[in-house]
Amino acid sequence: MRALIAIAAAALAAAVFTAGARATDFVAYEAPVAEQSAPVYQQDGFNWNGFYAGAIVGWYTEPGDTAFTFGKAVGVNFTAGNILYGVEFNLLQYNFGSFDTWNASGQTRLGLLVNDSTLVYKLVGVGYYNGGGSYGTYVKVGAGLEYALGQHFTVRGEYHAKIYPGGCCGHELRAGLLWHLN
């Protein structure tokens, strides 16, 4: 009987191990299929190159006087990597309360694009003012921060220091909303 149990166990083991070997012979290997996902729309960064125009408001102060300012800005920017070069022209009215002064100026900008939507820059320029019985020229230096809103608009804040030929100086804080034609 022992011999019969040994033969039955050997036959059962042979059948189990042989069947397993045959099962692997008939199954074809299938590579895992990558899950297909919907394409993701990635919006490009803000395009700082090109022409722009917009509105400016601000506050100007000089020894003995202050003024509310408002006006227009037009300009053009060029970028090389994350460096921005620009030229801008402003036409502003200064309301001193008892009189108004018109001011036209041009400035160059040199900036650093911190990321796709943020620009930090410095500026230098010259200007001409006329009103309230006086007129003349000045030099200005300053700095600003500009931030992109969507694909066509930016908001900015600037500081300008104005130096007049007589040595007097003025300080101006400006805010602007600009439309970029890109």
Image (cartoon, rainbow, N blue to C red):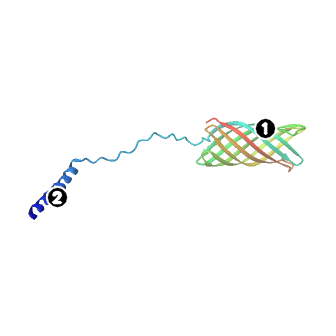
Secondary structure beneath label 1: strand
User: Seen in the image, is 104 located left or right of residue 11?
Assistant: right
Q: Amino acid at mark 2?
A: Ala
The residue positioned 74% from the left and 49% from the top of the image is 142
Residue situated in front as seen by the camera: 167 or 158: 158
Image x and y of residue 2, in percent:
10, 64
Secondary structure beneath label 2: helix
Query: Residue at label 2?
Result: 13
Give the number of the mark in front: 1 or 2. Answer: 2
Residue situated in front as seen by the camera: 66 or 133: 66
* Marking on residue 158: none
Q: Is residue 13 above or below residue 126?
A: below
Disc 1 from disc 2: Cα separation: 96 Å
Image x and y of residue 133, in percent:
90, 38
Q: Quadrant of the C terminus?
A: top right
* Marking on residue 70: 1
Image x and y of residue 86, in percent:
67, 43
The residue positioned 12% from the left and 62% from the top of the image is 6
